[in-house]
Amino acid sequence: MPNPVFLLVLAVAFAAFSFSAQRLYRFLRIGHDEIRWNDLGRRSWNLFSIGIGQRKILRDPVAGPLHALVFWGFVVLTAGSVEILVHGAMPAFSLERVLPPAMHGLFILSQEAFAVFVLVAVSVLLYRRIVVKPARLQGDNVHSGDAILILSMIAGLMVTLILMSAFDRIVSPRFPVVVQPVSAPVAMALSWVSPAVATAARDANWWAHALLLLVFLNYLPYSKHLHVIVSLPNTFLSNTSGPGPIGAMKPMDLEAETEQFGAADVMHLSWKNLLDGYSCTECGRCTSVCPANLTGKPLSPRKIVINTRERLAEVAPSIVGGTDVVAQPLFGDVAPEAQPGRRLTDTFITEEELWACTSCRACVHECPVSIDQLEIINELRRGLVLTESRFPEEVQPAFESMERNGSPWAFKPADRANWAEGLDIPTMAELAGRGIRPDVLFWVGCMGSFDDRAKKVTVAFARILQASGVHFAILGQEESCHGDPARRMGNEYLYQMLARQAIETLNGYGVTTVVTSCPHCFHQIGKEFPQLGGHFEVIHHSEFLARLLAEDKVPLDSEEGRHLTIAFHDSCYLGRYNDVYEAPREAIRRSLPVVSLAEPARTRDRGLCCGAGGGRMFMEERTGKRINVERTEELLATGADELAVACPFCLTMISDGARALGSEVPVQDIAEVVASRLRA
Ligand code: SF4
Ligand code: SF4
């Protein structure tokens, strides 16, 4: 016989939840469309490994296992919660009657075990929030009160669950102690309670548990803990770990009929960017690894995501209209209506924050629920530059020079291949004139062509290629900037103009394979040119060198030389963007037989940016500590004899950092390390 009172409670609770869910869905729809249903295999893998397996969370040795435990506990306990609700509505239903005894015993055991795990984990997390207060969980617009309330509710759910089982055991002890290792001792401790009181206490705990569950469910849509519901779908729908090229900026149709290119407000972002806002747990992992934030700049990727959610909550009700007016006050401290002149850029997120980003992807890589903070930053930068022509004034010369000279610096295009004078390196044009096509094109890049220090790396790499018998050529004066710095600084017009030119040049010579010593060229030509129809196999020089050395093609000096300790600095565009970590280390190890590699405190996928990416190379660093100095300090702290890099931008930044710190430790590119051992 159904329980009409509980049925009514359930109906009200689910009607309220469905109202809130629909409301959130309608809010998302104010973002523009984006397809996130492709490559279901890859998406399922991300869901399985990052979402269910908690791969990213578990990288944090303290809070990681606790959070993972709470998550897994929730999954297991959800089955029990469903049984409790169904049993409440239809008392005749019980899993005990449906499942075979052994399986039901396992089910009870899993509920008991996870109830205790979750209770312990939640207690520790509450202690951390209230007493320890780690820096990562403070600041920005973090909703600490909300977190404490939610954690307390979870603790309440676990306590009522255990007490319900314990009192039920006093009333009717029908399960062996082994499947009730928690409630059995509690029941024993409460054995003085009379059966009548135990029955009342069991029912009271059942009601408390069921009502708390329904309150919890209905509170979630208005809490930052909405992630409990949306983090798994968000992980499935995210592109941050694929599908598609990792780190590639969104394609942009510059012919589109719109007055707004890029974003200035939430309606210019995609629904997925807005879902990111719902999914943020406010854990602060992103901000704790952000080089800008670490060195005192006013940028916090967590704040960017929270601001996006707050602005959506502020403006969406007036856009979707209708019944939503009822729910507006539930947002508490957020202004209930969209006031004229308010928007995401400027009102919530300042220009200074946006331009502080080095596009290092550390935040994206760290986020346990696969949020793409950088995509929001990039879209807002595009909005500033393309629609409002707002950018730091020191960027103007770089834009102008890229347009006029095909390089961010005001060098003459005719001087691009001056570094190659006397080296007998053919250009593509010369070889084409003789009807020859080389095996690879060496794409030198603007830094490698014009910067005096980087030119030495270019020469070193070219010498290795020649000594190893690689049949290669360069574009010489025909090479031009591919536009990546312009794209990262929001100037998509300039980027597309330069990139299309470069693609035309490469296609004109039928180039299929490109090797480059610059990770930015490597990423741009290999991962982002396909958006404009340019398809080339691009190999970074670290991989090319590692391969040549492994195949014994590089003629090295037979003397072993002195023992060196080298600390290698991972470039963001090589590592986090392209997952190349081992090749540069391998190149060093294979060329220096008696070398030791020292790893700085932050290394590989957690390596700290040098501070040059995202166009920061062309901007002044006026606030806080210089990022390159912070990174160089970390590298020098290893006590290494030499520092090695695999990027011309990193070379400049780390060399400058060493100079600023008065260090004499040499900074070299890996090509120079290898070339130093070339047989005379
Ligand atoms: S990409 Fe790097 S610099 Fe930019 S917000 Fe993320 S962590 Fe900070
Ligand atoms: S964006 Fe991701 S890493 Fe950053 S606070 Fe939110 S959930 Fe944590």
Image (cartoon, grey):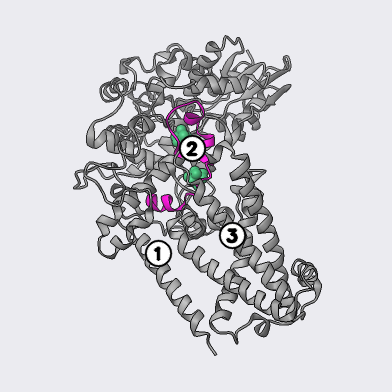
User: Which secondary structure is most common in the magenta stretch?
Assistant: helix
User: From mark 2 to mark 3, how far is it between C-alphas?
Assistant: 24 Å
> Dividing the image into 4 quarters, which one contains the N terminus?
bottom right
Q: Secondary structure at mark 2?
A: loop
Work out whether mark 2 precedes mark 3 in sequence or the reverse, and give the earlier one: 2
As shown in the figure, which amino acid type bears the numbered disc 1? Ala
Residue at 65 percent of width and 55 percent of height? 69
Left or right for 81, reference 374: right
Queried whether the magenta region covers residue 126, the answer comes back as: no
- x and y, in percent, of residue 37 in the image: 41, 59
- x and y, in percent, of residue 347 in the image: 30, 38
In this view, the residue in front, 388 or 193, is: 193
Q: Dividing the picture into quarters, in which one does residue 494 lie?
A: top left
As shown in the figure, which amino acid type bears the numbered disc 3? Ile
The magenta-colored residue range is: 272-301
Q: Which residue is mark 3?
A: 154
Q: Residues within 10 Å of mark 2 (few under 14, many from 20)?
A: few
Q: Secondary structure at mark 3?
A: helix
